[in-house]
Image (cartoon, helix red, strand yellow):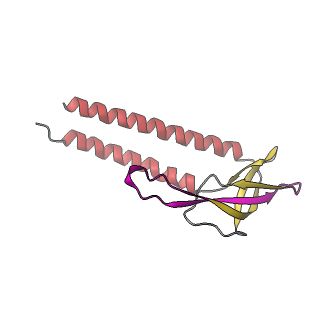
């Protein structure tokens, strides 16, 4: 019976490690692709509002995706929408830093350290959680 618990634990750890590795690699690819893109200040023009999913018996919460406008190096205005949601709605006129593709300024991203901070916390949490769950499986009382 204990072998089944170890097998379930190993499958969970492998699946979570694969998923986490995929997210980290995708984030690195995005950072490398946008590393030499120009950064400019964009003006918040509004926000698209939505709700969190409420998955796992969590309370649904209101989220906001700011919309913004910026001008490229040629002075042509472009608009965009943040891919990262905020808990509070940003006020119109507030500034955001965005990076845009100089070959296609319509492709832009809000420069945010939020994703990096989340990944920086998630990796150590996963390691500690895996170790604690292994200890739990090893000491789980079986008949």
Report x, y in % for residue 44.
Answer: 71, 64
Q: Is residue 4 left or right of residue 69?
A: left
Task: Specify the segment rendered in magenta.
Answer: 49-76
Residue drawn at point x = 67 percent, y = 55 percent: 110
In this view, which residue lies farthest toward the right?
74
Query: Is residue 68 depicted above or below 122 in this figure?
Result: below
Q: Quadrant of the C terminus?
A: top left
Residue drawn at point x = 61 percent, y = 66 percent: 89
Residue drawn at point x = 53 percent, y = 37 percent: 22
Query: Is residue 124 depicted above or below 10 in this figure?
Result: below
Report x, y in % for residue 80.
Answer: 73, 54
Magenta run includes residue 61: yes
Report x, y in % for residue 32.
Answer: 67, 43
Q: Is residue 117 left or right of residue 98?
A: left
How many numbered badges does the structure rendering display?
Answer: 0
Q: Quadrant of the N terminus?
A: top left
Q: Is residue 136 left or right of residue 115?
A: left
Q: Is residue 135 left or right of residue 50?
A: left
Residue drawn at point x = 38 percent, y = 53 percent: 57
Which residue is at the front of the view, 80 or 124?
A: 80
Magenta run includes residue 27: no
Q: Quadrant of residue 63?
A: bottom right
Report x, y in % for residue 69.
Answer: 76, 59
Query: Is residue 108 depicted above or below 7 in this figure?
Result: below
């Amino acid at each position: 019976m204990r072998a089944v618990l170890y097998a379930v634990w190993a499958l969970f750890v492998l699946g979570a490690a694969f998923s986490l590795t995929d997210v980290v690699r995708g984030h690195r690819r995005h950072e490398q692709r946008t590393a030499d893109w120009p950064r400019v200040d964009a003006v918040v023009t509004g926000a698209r509002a939505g709700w969190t999913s409420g998955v796992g018996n969590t309370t649904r919460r209101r989220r906001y995706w700011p919309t913004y406008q910026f001008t490229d190096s040629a002075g042509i205005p472009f608009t965009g929408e943040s891919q990262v949601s905020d808990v509070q709605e940003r006020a119109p006129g507030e500034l955001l830093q965005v990076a845009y593709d100089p070959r296609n300024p319509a492709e832009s991203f809000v420069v945010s350290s939020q994703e990096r901070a989340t990944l920086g916390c998630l990796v150590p949490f996963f390691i500690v959680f895996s170790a604690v769950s292994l200890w739990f499986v090893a000491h789980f009382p079986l008949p």
